[in-house]
């Protein structure tokens, strides 16, 4: 399912196919998955990649649903560099923060 969502949000033409309420539910699901998955779980990176596409290519910037929680979660993951966490997650979280600096401010 994460692969499908990642492909869906990879392109702005398909990312807007979801209704606003559906997009907000997906944000809730992604945040819960990112926060609840064990640190070494590779699925956490997949969930981050979906979130990355959602933030950039969907209607999320218009609503900025759960902006503070998204930012706090990404900052927490970005600061875990060197700890027991799936390789690439801190760098990906940092990149998402940088790419969406204005929207997550």
Image: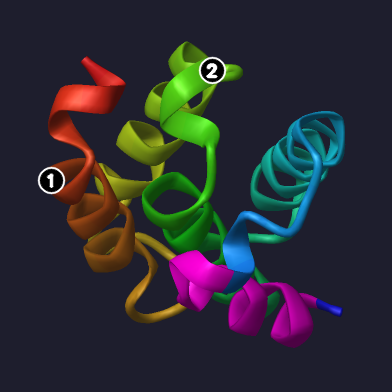
Q: Residue at x 76, y 51 (%)?
A: 33
Residue at image mark 2: 63
Quadrant assignment for the N terminus: bottom right
Q: Residue at x 41, y 29 (%)?
A: 61
Magenta segment's dominant SS is: helix
Would you place residue 73 above or below residue 97 in this image?
A: above
Disc 2 is placed on an element classified as helix
Would residue 105 be visible to someone looking at this image?
yes
Q: Is residue 9 magenta?
A: yes
Give 11 or 67, whichever is nearer the viewer.
Answer: 11
Would you place residue 17 above or below residue 98 in this image?
A: below
Residue at image mark 1: 98
Q: Residue at x 17, y 50 (%)?
A: 99
The image shows a total of numbered marks equal to 2
Quadrant assignment for the C terminus: top left
Which label lies toward us, 2 or 1?
2
Label pair 2/1, CB-CB below 8 angstroms: no
Whole-number angstrom distance, CA of label 2 to CA of label 1: 19 Å
Q: Residues within 10 Å of mark 2 (few under 14, many from 20)?
A: few
In the displayed structure image, the side of residue 59 where residue 25 appears, left or right? right
Q: What is the x, y in percent for residue 30?
A: 72, 48
Would residue 49 be visible to someone looking at this image?
no
Q: Quadrant of residue 9?
A: bottom right
Q: Which residues are magenta?
A: 2-13
Q: Residues within 10 Å of mark 1 (few under 14, many from 20)?
A: few
Q: Is residue 97 magenta?
A: no
Q: What is the x, y in percent for residue 22?
A: 86, 40
| Between discs 2 and 1, the one toward the N terminus | 2
């Amino acid at each position: 399912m994460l692969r499908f969502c990642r492909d869906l949000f990879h392109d702005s033409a398909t990312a807007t196919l979801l209704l606003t309420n559906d997009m907000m539910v997906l944000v809730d699901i992604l945040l819960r998955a990112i926060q609840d998955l064990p640190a070494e779980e590779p699925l956490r990176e997949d969930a981050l990649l979906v979130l990355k596409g959602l933030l950039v290519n969907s209607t999320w910037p218009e609503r900025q649903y759960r902006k503070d929680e998204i930012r706090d979660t990404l900052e927490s993951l970005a600061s875990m560099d060197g700890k027991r966490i799936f390789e690439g997650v801190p760098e990906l979280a940092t990149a998402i923060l940088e790419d969406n600096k204005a929207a997550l401010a």
